[in-house]
Image (spheres, rainbow, N blue to C red):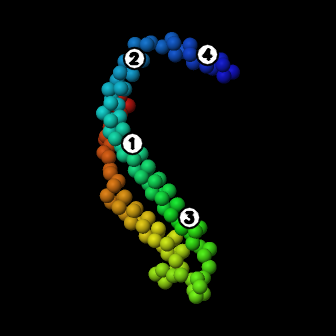
């Protein structure tokens, strides 16, 4: 059944008027050339922002994971006290609180300073739709 459908599709396509198809393709390429440039810039900017955010996520993930894995199971020191920083156990401060504050600072910088809004072409109503 699939082979028959494919054969029918090929035969139908070959029977179409090639001049009409070429004319339609030329019109589409002219209409989309300006739109493609704008969407291309928008796509490139979004892709660049995505890579920056992915890199930041990896950095903060590694910071939290490695810091907590390395220091969370440390027992009390010689005096029997757990090391503290800012009134919290040191591993909580260096593995959770500081990365959290740093990630929030990065997000604020990223959103306010790095992200760019790229203009898109205005949507035009279709002509000939009656």
Q: Earlier in the sequence, mark 3 or mark 2?
A: 2
Quick one: which residue is furthest to the front in this view? Answer: 78
In this rendering, the answer to whether 109 lies above or below 52 is below
Image x and y of residue 52, in percent: 42, 52
Q: Quadrant of the C terminus?
A: top left
Q: Nearer the viewer, mark 1 or mark 4?
A: 1
Please tell me which residue is depicted at 59% across the width and 73% down the height of the picture: 72
Residue to which mark 3 is pinned: 65
Please tell me in which quadrant of the rendered image residue 28 appears: top left
Image x and y of residue 98, in percent: 46, 71
Q: Which numbered dot is residue 22?
A: 2
Q: Earlier in the sequence, mark 3 or mark 4?
A: 4
Report helix, strand or loop for mark 1.
Answer: helix
Look at the numbered discs 1 and 3 and tell me whether their residues touch, using CB distance below 8 Å.
no
Whole-angstrom CA distance, mark 3 to mark 2, is 58 Å
Compare residues 120 and 40 and report the one nearer the observer: 40
Residue to which mark 4 is pinned: 7
Residue to which mark 1 is pinned: 43
Please tell me which residue is depicted at 35% across the width and 34% down the height of the picture: 36
Image x and y of residue 126, in percent: 35, 33
């Amino acid at each position: 059944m699939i082979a028959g459908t494919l054969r029918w599709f090929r035969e139908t396509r070959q029977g179409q008027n090639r001049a009409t198809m070429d004319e339609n393709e030329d019109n589409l390429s002219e209409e989309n050339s300006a739109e493609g440039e704008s969407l291309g810039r928008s796509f490139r900017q979004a892709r660049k922002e995505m890579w920056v955010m992915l890199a930041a996520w990896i950095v903060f993930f590694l910071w939290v994971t490695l810091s907590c894995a390395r220091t969370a199971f440390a027992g009390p020191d010689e005096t029997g006290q757990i090391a503290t920083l800012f009134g919290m156990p040191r591993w909580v401060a260096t593995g959770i609180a500081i990365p959290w504050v740093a990630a929030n600072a990065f997000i604020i910088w990223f959103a306010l300073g790095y992200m760019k809004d790229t203009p898109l072409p205005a949507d035009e109503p279709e002509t000939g739709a009656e």
